[in-house]
Amino acid sequence: MPARPAAKASPDPAGLLGCSCMWLRKATRRLSQIYDQHLEPLGLTITQYGLLARLSAADGIGVGAFAEQLVMDPTTLTRNLRPLQRQRLVVFARDPRDRRSRMLHLTARGRERLAEARPVWAKAQHQIEESVGRADVAALHASLGRLLERLAA
Amino acid sequence: MPARPAAKASPDPAGLLGCSCMWLRKATRRLSQIYDQHLEPLGLTITQYGLLARLSAADGIGVGAFAEQLVMDPTTLTRNLRPLQRQRLVVFARDPRDRRSRMLHLTARGRERLAEARPVWAKAQHQIEESVGRADVAALHASLGRLLERLAA
DNA sequence: TGCCAATACCTGCATATACAGGTATATAGC
DNA sequence: GCTATATACCTGTATATGCAGGTATTGGCA
């Protein structure tokens, strides 16, 4: 029996119960709300936390390569980095070997902020796993991982 | 063996392989891109298609109730409806019994556009099911449905 | 050397998303 | 009827997202 959250009587005349994108968008809205509420006192969104965390493992990477890792348009990434840049959590540095490229670096301040934020993020993640079930969450991640592999651009 | 798309060597120092929101956002970006490419000739995004389709099953609904159905902030919905309003695919009508409320209606033009778009949407959905596997897609939908039920606001 | 195509990034525009705080209307108490 | 509160929606501001098209730099090739 498939799960059906809101729909009352309608037999899905629009076929939207079968639209993968609607399900994903809806779930993304709800989850973002939860993470963002937890992170708000730190002045970070979940997107920004994610960028800091990824960058801490890829220091010096260029915008293009970073965007590809994130399955994100490079122009989107450029703009998503701006609030972090304004808070002096990340910096852009010209690559002397290729002056077109900009190497991204976490600042000391950025590493500090990330260290503060990590347990807050973990609390949000834990809350979600409590509500949804650890196994279901793991299955969801695996499912999304397969989807991204099979739809790789 | 859990699926791991991009990460090369790093043992996930940031814990992000376990962040549900990152997985969802990433997958949403990729899927939106696919649907939007299909729908582009019709002048619709996947979000807009979804609003038309849902509205066709809930004609006359108010902004607040519609937003709740969509797990979306009412102010977001108001603005998402604007491009459709400009294209005269939907209209707002004052409810005579409660002049605060605005009843949303598809126009004839809106119903036409939806009829044109439906097979295009179906083609995108079909492509995704071909690539990802019908069973995996169904499991994903069920998984997201459960998540939304258990995290209902 | 000098030009051209490819590359790495950016700006302009449009949509998608939500919070804070505003206006207009309705309803409950009195 | 009057007022206080609640409700339904909107605007201002900020971030998130991606496409079209631009600039600067690099590298290949004549």
Image (spheres, coloured by chain):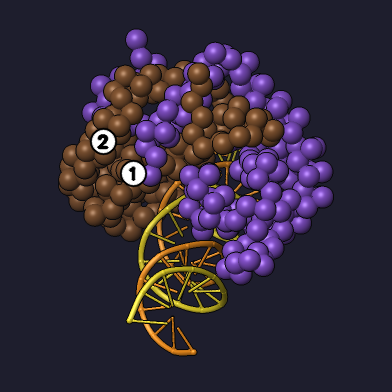
Chain colours: A purple, B brown, C orange, D yellow
Q: Where is B90 relative to A125, above or below?
A: below
The amino acid sitting under disc 1 is Ile
Q: Residues within 10 Å of mark 1 (few under 14, many from 20)?
A: some
Q: Is residue B138 above or below residue B43?
A: above
Marks 1/2: CA–CA distance: 9 Å
Q: Which residue is located at x 65 percent, y 25 percent?
A: A125
Residue at figure coordinates x 62%, y 62% from the top left: A102
Q: Describe the element under mark 2 as helix, strand or loop.
A: helix
Seen from the viewer's position, the closer of residues B72 and A26 is A26
Disc 1 vs disc 2: Cβ atoms closer than 8 Å?
yes
Q: Which residue is mark 2?
A: B127
What residue appears at the point 26 percent right and 30 percent down from the top-left corner?
B130
Residue C18 location (% of width, % of height): 57, 41
As drawn, A8 above or below A44: above
Asked whether the viewer can see residue B72, the reply is no
Residue underneath mark 1 = B34
Q: Position of residue A76 (x, y in %)?
A: 52, 54
Chain at tag 2: B
Disc 1 secondary structure class = helix
B35 on left or right of A126: left
**Chain ID for label 1?**
B
> Where is the N terminus of chain A found, in terms of image quarters?
top left
Q: Amino acid at mark 2?
A: Gln
Instruction: Depth check: give the residue in front, B22 or D28.
Output: D28
Indicate the position of residue B132 as horizontal and vertical percent values: 33, 28
Residue nearest the viewer, comparing B152 with B118 = B118
